[in-house]
Amino acid sequence: MNTASEVLVIIVSSVLAIFLIILIVALAYIIKILKQVRHITDRAENVADSVEAAASAFERTASPLAVLKIIGNIIEQTTRIRNRRK
Protein backbone atom coordinates (compact mmCIF):
# COMPACT_ATOMS: atom_id res chain seq x y z
CA MET A 1 0.00 0.00 0.00
CA ASN A 2 1.20 3.42 -0.72
CA THR A 3 1.01 6.35 1.64
CA ALA A 4 -2.14 7.93 0.20
CA SER A 5 -4.19 4.77 0.54
CA GLU A 6 -2.93 4.24 4.11
CA VAL A 7 -3.97 7.78 5.03
CA LEU A 8 -7.39 7.24 3.45
CA VAL A 9 -7.83 3.95 5.37
CA ILE A 10 -6.93 5.70 8.63
CA ILE A 11 -9.33 8.58 7.93
CA VAL A 12 -12.19 6.29 6.95
CA SER A 13 -11.68 3.98 9.91
CA SER A 14 -11.52 6.90 12.35
CA VAL A 15 -14.70 8.44 10.88
CA LEU A 16 -16.45 5.08 11.12
CA ALA A 17 -15.30 4.67 14.72
CA ILE A 18 -16.64 8.15 15.59
CA PHE A 19 -19.98 7.36 13.94
CA LEU A 20 -20.12 4.05 15.78
CA ILE A 21 -19.57 5.76 19.13
CA ILE A 22 -22.19 8.40 18.31
CA LEU A 23 -24.61 5.65 17.27
CA ILE A 24 -24.08 3.73 20.52
CA VAL A 25 -24.69 6.86 22.62
CA ALA A 26 -27.78 7.78 20.59
CA LEU A 27 -29.12 4.24 20.91
CA ALA A 28 -28.67 4.36 24.68
CA TYR A 29 -30.66 7.63 24.84
CA ILE A 30 -33.36 6.20 22.58
CA ILE A 31 -33.71 3.15 24.82
CA LYS A 32 -33.96 5.40 27.88
CA ILE A 33 -36.63 7.55 26.20
CA LEU A 34 -38.61 4.47 25.15
CA LYS A 35 -38.60 3.20 28.74
CA GLN A 36 -39.96 6.54 29.92
CA VAL A 37 -42.62 6.49 27.21
CA ARG A 38 -43.63 2.99 28.28
CA HIS A 39 -43.86 4.16 31.90
CA ILE A 40 -46.00 7.14 30.87
CA THR A 41 -48.34 4.98 28.78
CA ASP A 42 -48.75 2.55 31.69
CA ARG A 43 -49.74 5.46 33.94
CA ALA A 44 -52.11 6.77 31.29
CA GLU A 45 -53.73 3.35 31.05
CA ASN A 46 -54.17 3.24 34.81
CA VAL A 47 -55.73 6.70 34.79
CA ALA A 48 -58.03 5.75 31.92
CA ASP A 49 -59.10 2.61 33.77
CA SER A 50 -59.79 4.64 36.90
CA VAL A 51 -61.83 7.20 34.98
CA GLU A 52 -63.72 4.42 33.25
CA ALA A 53 -64.49 2.73 36.55
CA ALA A 54 -65.63 6.03 38.05
CA ALA A 55 -67.81 6.73 35.02
CA SER A 56 -69.44 3.31 35.21
CA ALA A 57 -70.03 3.73 38.95
CA PHE A 58 -71.57 7.14 38.32
CA GLU A 59 -73.70 5.67 35.54
CA ARG A 60 -74.96 2.96 37.88
CA THR A 61 -75.83 5.49 40.58
CA ALA A 62 -77.14 8.19 38.24
CA SER A 63 -80.34 6.32 37.40
CA PRO A 64 -81.36 5.71 41.03
CA LEU A 65 -80.42 9.27 41.91
CA ALA A 66 -82.57 10.58 39.09
CA VAL A 67 -85.50 8.49 40.28
CA LEU A 68 -84.99 9.71 43.84
CA LYS A 69 -84.82 13.30 42.61
CA ILE A 70 -88.07 12.90 40.69
CA ILE A 71 -89.74 11.36 43.75
CA GLY A 72 -88.37 14.20 45.89
CA ASN A 73 -89.76 16.77 43.46
CA ILE A 74 -93.17 15.09 43.51
CA ILE A 75 -93.21 15.07 47.31
CA GLU A 76 -92.10 18.71 47.39
CA GLN A 77 -94.85 19.73 44.96
CA THR A 78 -97.51 17.88 46.91
CA THR A 79 -96.42 19.50 50.18
CA ARG A 80 -96.54 22.93 48.53
CA ILE A 81 -100.04 22.26 47.24
CA ARG A 82 -101.17 21.08 50.68
CA ASN A 83 -99.67 24.14 52.34
CA ARG A 84 -101.49 26.44 49.89
CA ARG A 85 -104.84 24.81 50.60
CA LYS A 86 -104.57 25.35 54.33
Image (cartoon, rainbow, N blue to C red):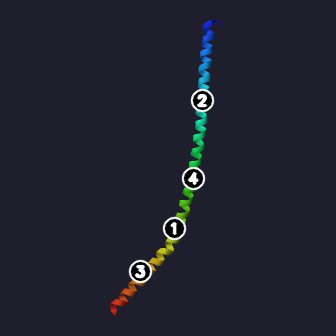
* Disc number lying in front (2 or 1): 2
CA distance separating discs 3 and 2: 71 Å
| Residue plotted at (59% across, 48% down) | 39
Circles 2, 1 touching at the beta carbon (< 8 Å): no
Q: Secondary structure at mark 2?
A: helix
The spot of residue 72 in percent (x, y) is 44, 81
Number of numbered discs visible in the structure rendering: 4
Tell me if residue 2 comes above or below residue 76 in the rendering.
above
Q: Which residue is mark 4?
A: 43
Question: Which of the marked residues, 2 or 4, is nearer the chain's N terminus?
Answer: 2
CA distance separating discs 1 and 4: 22 Å
- Which mark is on residue 3? none
Q: Which residue is mark 3?
A: 73
Q: Secondary structure at mark 1?
A: helix
Q: Which residue is mark 1?
A: 58
Q: Locate the C terminus and report the quarter of the image it occupies.
A: bottom left
Question: Which of the marked residues, 1 or 4, is nearer the chain's N terminus?
Answer: 4
